Image (cartoon, rainbow, N blue to C red):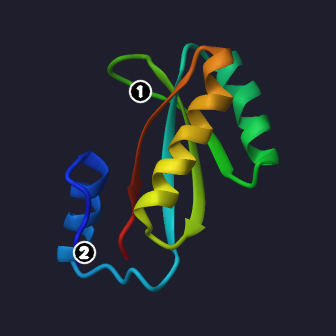
Amino acid sequence: MKFPNDADGDALQSLYKDGVNFKKPQSVEFFVAVPDQTTGEKLSQVLKGEGFNCFLEQDDETDEWACCCSKRMLLNYNELINIQKKLDNISKPLGGYSDGWGVFVD
């Protein structure tokens, strides 16, 4: 399977090499950096309305906040890019930005 030559493509290539089934929906975790807890709570509510399962997390070492949003979906490059753009567009007015994604492999 071929993937684009960028960070998202590299991540998909790695998952493919690890034997992840691309024909089965996976739980994909998207991370959105936010400036503070209050903003994260507001954003979580908005994103829940968009169909994401969300929780807010603060990094113990850096004290930075992130809204972690999961969605079950097929691993598809274009869909992953579109979701990250959507998260950016929703979070930017609140001072946030899309900060990557990951998959928890069983």
> 38 above or below 79?
above
Q: Are marks 2 and 1 in contact (CB under 8 Å)?
A: no
Residue of label 2: 16
Callout 2 crowding tier (Cα within 10 Å): few <14, some 14–19, many ≥20: some
Single out the mark in the foreground, 2 or 1.
2
Q: Nearer the viewer, residue 97 or 54?
A: 97
Residue at 17 percent across and 75 percent down: it is: 17
> Which of the image's four quarters has the N terminus?
bottom left
* Kind of residue sitting beneath label 1: Asp
* Kind of residue sitting beneath label 2: Tyr
32 relative to 75 in the view: left or right? right
Tell me the SS state at disc 1.
loop
31 relative to 10 in the view: left or right? right
Residue at 56 percent across and 21 percent down: it is: 96
Residue of label 1: 59
Q: Position of residue 6 (x, y in %)?
A: 23, 47
Residue at 20 percent across and 65 percent down: it is: 14
Q: Nearer the viewer, residue 23 or 102?
A: 23
In the rendered image, is residue 25 in sight? yes
Q: Position of residue 67 (x, y in %)?
A: 58, 35
> 16 above or below 60?
below
